[in-house]
Amino acid sequence: MPPIDLRSDTVTRPTPAMRQFIAIAPVGDDVIDVDPTCDRLEKLTAELLGKEAAVFMPSGSMTNQVAVRIHCKPGDEFICESGCHIYNYEQGAFAQLSGLVARTVEGKFGVLHVDQVRGLIRPDNEHLLRTRLICLENTHNRGAGKIQPYENMVAICEWAHKNSLRTHLDGARLFNAVAATNIDANTWSQRFDTVSVCFSKGLGAPVGSALAGTKEAMKEARRHRKLFGGGMRQVGIIAAGALYALENNRGRLLEDHANAQILAEAIRQTDGLTLTPDVVDTNIVIFRVEEALGTAAEFAAELKEQNVLCFAIGPAQVRLVTHLDVSQAQCTAASEIIQSTAAAMAKGKRKAKLVEAAY
Ligand SMILES: *Cc1c(COP(=O)(O)O)cnc(C)c1O
């Protein structure tokens, strides 16, 4: 039996229909002039996000790093939430590639309030960095797929623009927020100068992300994409997978959210496990493993023995992510395995060899 893979929504494989679409996609040299499939994808992305233009890139990390680069110059500073992807999971590329400093502010499951950022803009003084940008993340990965409260986000963007800061949204999972609310992608994006979205997360494409913004900003983005090694030639071959995903897989994200609720409910009912936060908004479930049971890495190793894959993301924290390659039946089966594993570990029973913590 194939494992029930809840490690990430990036593990999805292309379906036969997506492969067929990729196989027949028209292509061109997108660095010399244009690749028609990539062009279609960029236009559709821009339209959905209500922006003038979009640029396709190989990864979400690149879209974020190009975004911070076009908003900031070396020696500038940007504000972000301390658990965000840009700060934690991109090797500090903003420092390595662009000479930038990040000022982190701790949110509540990834959510910042405007009162926390007021007063953080440094005055114009030659001793000081220049504060240029604020980045938000929606949905928030480390915040267990938390949807940013809309009004709150608007308040932060209004404050930022009033104070001449730029705004960037890491919307790797923006379409999860769209599916879960009655707020469309255009409305979510409106207040941001740039927005990045991933096609290879819940949408199920093999590769790719895009950055959207004004025509002028996207012209700059194309330059920096090339600088960072992301100029791609017959890119329609991979853009086709992303286009197929964007056209066909947005609506079904709600199935992933419903499946996450099955897992969440099972965890709520299990002694020794605590959902953090208790409410699951979208497709990411994070829970704490009580010390009496063992570490998160041990818990994940026990689950693996029973064909359920997940990641320990901290000493006591386990993350589960639902996606289009796990069915409702598999999530129900995984829930039962999680409950029986917790019960067995509470009694000191282990099947897996002791593992080194890795997160
Ligand atoms: C996955 C992810 C990204 C981009 O990751 P890549 O692996 O570089 O595509 C960016 N932001 C968030 C919040 C993510 O979850």
Image (cartoon, rainbow, N blue to C red):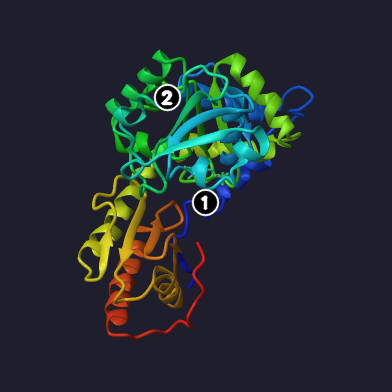
Q: Earlier in the sequence, mark 1 or mark 2?
A: 1
Is residue 68 rendered to the left or right of residue 349? right
Q: What amino acid is found at the position of numbered circle 2 in the picture?
A: Ser
> Is the CB of mark 1 within 8 Å of ligand 1?
yes
The percent coordinates of residue 45 (x first, y second) are 52, 27
Image point 60% across, 34% down: which residue? 65
**Residue at figure coordinates x 54%, y 25% from the top left:** 128
Q: Is residue 288 above or below residue 32?
A: below
Query: At 47% across and 51% down in the image, what residue appears?
Result: 9
Q: Residue furthest front?
A: 127
Categorize mark 2 by other alpha carbons within 10 Å: few (<14), some (14-19), many (20+).
many
Question: Which disc is residue 189 wearing?
Answer: 2
Question: In the rendered image, which residue does mark 1 sit on?
Answer: 10
Q: Is residue 82 above or below residue 286?
A: above
Q: Is residue 240 visible?
A: no
From the viewer's side, name the closer residue of 252 and 33: 33
Q: Is 210 placed left or right of 316 in the picture?
A: right
Whether the residue carrying mark 2 lies under 8 Å from ligand 1 is answered with: no
- The residue mark sitting in front, 1 or 2, is 2
Helix, strand or loop status at disc 2: helix
Q: Which mark is residue 125?
A: none
Q: Quadrant of residue 150?
A: top left
Q: Position of residue 10 (x, y in %)?
A: 52, 51
Q: Residues within 10 Å of mark 1 (few under 14, many from 20)?
A: many
